[in-house]
Image (cartoon, rainbow, N blue to C red):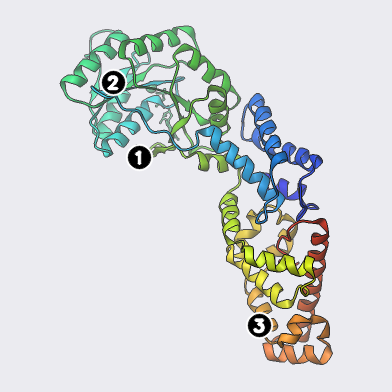
């Protein structure tokens, strides 16, 4: 995943004060790969990575985050911005029924989506009506009727036995019918082809002209991959649309299509369809999609937590000790930092998810959460003088501490060694000019 690769990139970089051009380039390469793996279109990747690089150059280095986390945060924020920032709400007509026209390729999920959207609107107190304007595909009308019944929403369709019928006429009549029956939303399902074709576009455009929709939604299968840009552009030119609905998000698509389409068309993704059930439908959440595209699991949540947990005062104290010679990094500080790490969540949770922690992963995989309790017991069996000046902890003191904490002398030795290693690491980081990361991490 991207977080693994970034952790590798930053292996030797933790705590550095500022990202160099070379660091930014290395990171940009990893982001590029991650986006391509998520099926984001190449031109979109290029533009996006360019924007991220530019922002990374101008950014002050954060106290709370390590460089990898900080870059991921920038990437995440840029992704969310392109995907539409806050979810845009449907625009309802000021008077008369609100008309929503669905357009997209055959199999994109329009007919299914029509019913899901109708149910969703119904649950908000609307009285929607579905309109069957796909008179092309055999059984398309029936499919909409079946779906309509499932969600308890009436379907307007040409009377059976009327031949093929004219979708533009059906669309026009449906608006009159909706006014008569006081439906406040009309959802018009249209025909699609397997590929973009001129006749299909013209028909959709004619229906659009006939019903003057308040919203045209482009429905697209999240699995569309690299065809996303071309298809979206064709529908934008041929019919025009105001928003995007992404379907089949329950599949294993990483969601790059969302970024490609939003970026190229400038239209927000508004809804997400994620399953066969009528309730598998929701407003689109750009932040969730961003983490899906990045394939980062809960890493973004952890970044947020890290920023919150980061205690400015404590940092200032530690920094003062390191830089200002107000005394050295002590065992008390060491313990405090371990506890801070624990605050972020269980060790096992952090293990897989914190970028920059890759270097600790192996140790952590065998790491026992109770380790912190044992370390705490040992440190608490030391006198204040010993904690402040660990160099004084000689053989007989170690024996006493071991007895007091119920551990062995070997355990005490290991802890003292680990502490001196951590202190060395802190001092090296301090020389690098940056904030210490998490020197309390076992290693
Ligand atoms: P249309 O040709 O655009 O009207 O697409 P349909 O609504 O007929 O959907 C095509 C196929 O995709 C059908 O088998 C649907 O059941 C399926 N489908 C639609 N939306 C979803 C979804 O969100 N998840 C999954 N797994 N399947 C879906
Ligand atoms: Mg259909």
Mark sitting earlier along the chain (2/1): 2
Disc 1 crowd, CA 10 A, few/some/many (<14, 14-19, 20+): some
Q: Are marks 2 and 3 in contact (CB under 8 Å)?
A: no
Q: Are marks 3 and 1 in contact (CB under 8 Å)?
A: no
Q: Is 122 in front, or is 160?
A: 122
Q: Which mark is residue 279?
A: 1
For label 2, the SS is strand
Q: CA distance from mark 3 to mark 1?
A: 52 Å
| Picture coordinates of residue 195, whole percent (x, y) | 51, 15
Mark sitting earlier along the chain (2/3): 2
Mark 1, ligand 1, within 8 Å: the answer is no
Q: CA distance from mark 2 to mark 3?
A: 71 Å
Name the image quarter holding the N terminus. Answer: top right
Mark sitting earlier along the chain (3/1): 1
When asked about the image quadrant of residue 260, the answer is top right
Q: CA distance from mark 2 to mark 1?
A: 20 Å
Q: Residue at x 65, y 31 (%)?
A: 48
* 391 in relation to 155, above or below: below
Disc 3 crowd, CA 10 A, few/some/many (<14, 14-19, 20+): some
Disc 2 marks which residue? Answer: 131
* 421 in relation to 43, above or below: below
Residue 55 seen anywhere in this rendered image of the structure:
yes
Disc 3 marks which residue? Answer: 377
When asked about the image quadrant of residue 93, the answer is top left
When asked about the image quadrant of residue 423, the answer is bottom right
């Amino acid at each position: 995943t991207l977080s693994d690769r970034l952790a590798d990139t930053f292996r030797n970089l933790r705590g550095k004060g500022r990202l160099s051009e070379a660091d930014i380039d290395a990171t940009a390469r990893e982001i590029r790969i991650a986006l391509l793996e998520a099926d984001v279109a190449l031109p979109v990747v290029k533009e996006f990575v360019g924007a991220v690089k530019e922002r990374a150059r101008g950014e002050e280095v954060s106290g709370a985050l390590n460089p990898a986390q900080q870059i991921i945060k920038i990437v995440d924020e840029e992704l969310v911005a392109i995907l539409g920032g806050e979810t845009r709400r449907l625009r309802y007509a000021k008077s008369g029924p609100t008309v929503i026209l669905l357009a997209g390729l055959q199999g994109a999920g329009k007919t299914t989506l029509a019913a899901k959207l109708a149910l969703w609107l119904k649950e908000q107190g609307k009285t929607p009506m579905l309109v069957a304007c796909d008179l092309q595909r055999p059984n398309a009308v029936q499919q909409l009727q079946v779906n309509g019944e499932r969600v308890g929403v009436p379907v307007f369709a040409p009377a059976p036995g009327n031949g093929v019928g004219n979708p533009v006429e059906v669309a026009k009549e449906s608006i009159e019918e909706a006014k008569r029956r006081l439906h406040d939303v009309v959802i018009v399902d249209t025909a699609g082809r397997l590929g973009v074709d001129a006749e299909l576009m013209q028909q959709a455009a004619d229906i659009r002209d006939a019903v003057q929709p308040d919203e045209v939604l482009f429905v697209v299968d999240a699995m569309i991959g690299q065809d996303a840009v071309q298809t979206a552009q064709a529908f934008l030119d041929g019919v025009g649309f105001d928003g995007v609905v992404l379907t089949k998000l329950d599949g294993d698509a990483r969601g790059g299509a969302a970024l490609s389409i939003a970026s190229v068309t400038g239209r927000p993704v508004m809804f997400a369809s994620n399953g066969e059930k009528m309730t598998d439908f929701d407003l689109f959440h750009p932040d969730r999609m961003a983490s899906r595209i990045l394939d980062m699991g809960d890493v973004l949540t952890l970044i947020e937590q890290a920023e919150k947990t980061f205690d400015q005062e404590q940092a200032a104290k530690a920094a003062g000790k390191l830089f200002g010679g107000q005394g050295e990094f002590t065992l008390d500080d060491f313990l405090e930092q371990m506890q801070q790490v624990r605050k972020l969540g269980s060790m096992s949770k952090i293990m897989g998810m914190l970028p920059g922690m890759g270097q600790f992963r192996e140790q952590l995989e065998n790491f026992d959460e109770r380790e912190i309790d044992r370390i705490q017991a040992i440190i608490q069996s030391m006198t204040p003088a010993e904690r402040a000046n660990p160099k004084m902890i000689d053989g007989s003191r170690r024996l006493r501490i071991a007895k007091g904490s119920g551990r062995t002398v070997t355990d005490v030795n290991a802890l003292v060694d680990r502490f001196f290693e951590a202190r060395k690491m802190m001092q090296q980081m301090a020389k690098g000019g940056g904030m210490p990361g998490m020197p309390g991490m076992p290693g």
